[in-house]
Image: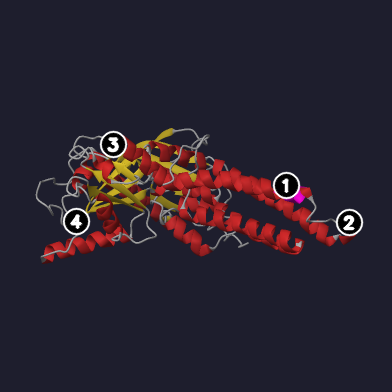
Amino acid sequence: MSEKPPVIEDTIVAQATPPGRGGIGVVRLSGDRVQNICQAITGLLPEPRFASISNFIDSDESVIDRGLVIYFPKPASFTGEHVLELHGHGGPVVMKLLIDRCQQLGARIAAPGEFSERAFLNGKIDLSQAEAIADLIDSASKAAAKSAVRSMQGEFSKRIEKLTENVTLLRMYVEAAIDFPEEEIDFLGNKKVQGMLESILAEFDDVTKRATQGALLREGASLVLAGRPNAGKSSLMNSLTGKEVSIVTNIAGTTRDIVDNYIHLDGLPLRLIDTAGLHTAGDVIEIEGVKRAHSEIRNADHVILIVDCFAHRGEIAAATEELRGEVPGEIPVTVVVNKIDLNQEWQQEVDAVPEDWIPVSAKTGEGMKSLRGHLKQALGFITVEGGTFIARARHLDALTRARASIETGERQLMEAGAGELLAEELKLCQQALGEITGIFTSDDLLGMIFSSFCIGK
């Protein structure tokens, strides 16, 4: 476990509202000099957590602005330190004058995420809650925002803490049995140990399922539309987005560059990428377009291969198999059999239609509802009863490593009856879970996390 660095005793200041012009602008401060700075600027130290109106005074006694003052004494504040908010008019000049005045009085400009970092260091929130604050601000959908709020309020943390507590109890039981061999506990025949292991693994499955959905809500997925020229990629792009994003003509090779757009499938953010038709290119522009298409395919989370069932009458299966060869084997694929309005007998040409083949007509809209449902299922996006937790890739990695330790310990116990090895794996599990909430973490990780926050948060 790494020691938390001592709380910095200087006072920080930043604009807490977005830069630019607005009706209201908020300057936020945190630190030991807040009380002195407040009295110097406003001439008063207002009653805690009550909004008071005051002039904001510059060093030459002139009035910078007039607005609200709210004071939060430590430790009952967001950061756990004295916090001051000055609510003035949201002009960039006014905000700069206020911040300059605070700097004259001993405050320094806050680093990105430093208010949230101080809240974490002072024990007001844990690391996953701090990350959820940034995720709530960056939410791209209503579902993502709701998941972020659940994590920010501590639901994710509580599940991790409960899981950690159960792992700790099992570790204590196992280590006690090791330390007192006279008790002669038979680990292999001990149903209590096996029952606790099964219960912990079941809890892992539920937490991971919810966190996985939360990660999808936060990070989304990239879907590349690929196929031969004039297969209907651009038409499918426009149908999925509901707007004319890509140019559609009867001329093959209309799309020569990458066209992308964002959509939501029941809250799941997706980046759709329309690419140039895959073929043997004839000129420099086409060659570059096909090269970029292959690059996007290699980096995709999922590839939608569009097959023109009208142009490939009688050879749909062969055309599809040839097209699959353009996609690396590790990348999941959905085959969209397009233009079924022009070839309604296409299924008779295929022995058995695979589950990952979705027939559609991008022109008429037939089959598009089925495609959307298939994509959600293919990406692993399901509705979880009771809600999801917003999560990040590092959370999922920690959960995976923690569960792997439990499985390894259980296997060693069953194969060798080794309670000592089980105890060691339980310890590794605890450490991995602690990385999620920040109990076990590194200064480098903290710096990376909080540097991605916006200024003033």
Q: Which mark is residue 276?
A: 4
Distance from Cα at disc 1 to Cα at disc 3: 47 Å
Q: If you read the primary sequence from the N terminus, does the residue marked by circle 3 or circle 2 appear first? A: 2
- Dot 4 or dot 1: first in sequence order is 1
Q: Secondary structure at mark 2?
A: helix
Q: How many numbered marks have been drawn onto this rendered protein structure? A: 4
Give the residue displayed 72% in from the left and 64% down from the top: 421
Foreground residue among 74 and 172: 172
The residue labelled by disc 2 is 183
> What amino acid type should be assigned to the residue bearing mark 4?
Ala
Along the viewing direction, whichever of 233 and 351 lies nearer the viewer: 351
Which numbered disc, 1 or 3, marks the residue closer to the eye?
A: 3
**Is residue 95 magenta-colored?**
no
Any part of residue 157 in sight? no
Q: Are marks 4 and 3 in contact (CB under 8 Å)?
A: no
Residue 298 placement, left or right of 8:
left
Mark toward the start of the polypeptide (4 vs 3): 4
Q: Between tags 4 and 3, which lies in front? A: 3
Mark 4, other Cα within 10 Å: few <14 / some 14–19 / many ≥20: many
Left or right: 257, with 386 as reference point: left
| Residue 82 percent location from the top left of the image | 52, 46
Would you say residue 193 sits in the magenta stretch? yes
Query: Would you identify the image quadrant in which residue 26 lies?
Result: top left
Range covered by the magenta-colored residues? 192-196
Nearer to us of marks 3 and 2 is 3
Per the model, the C-alpha gap separating discs 4 and 2 is: 71 Å
The residue pinned by badge 3 equals: 367
What amino acid is found at the position of numbered circle 1 in the picture?
Gly
Separation (CA) of disc 3 from disc 2: 66 Å
Q: Amino acid at mark 2?
A: Glu
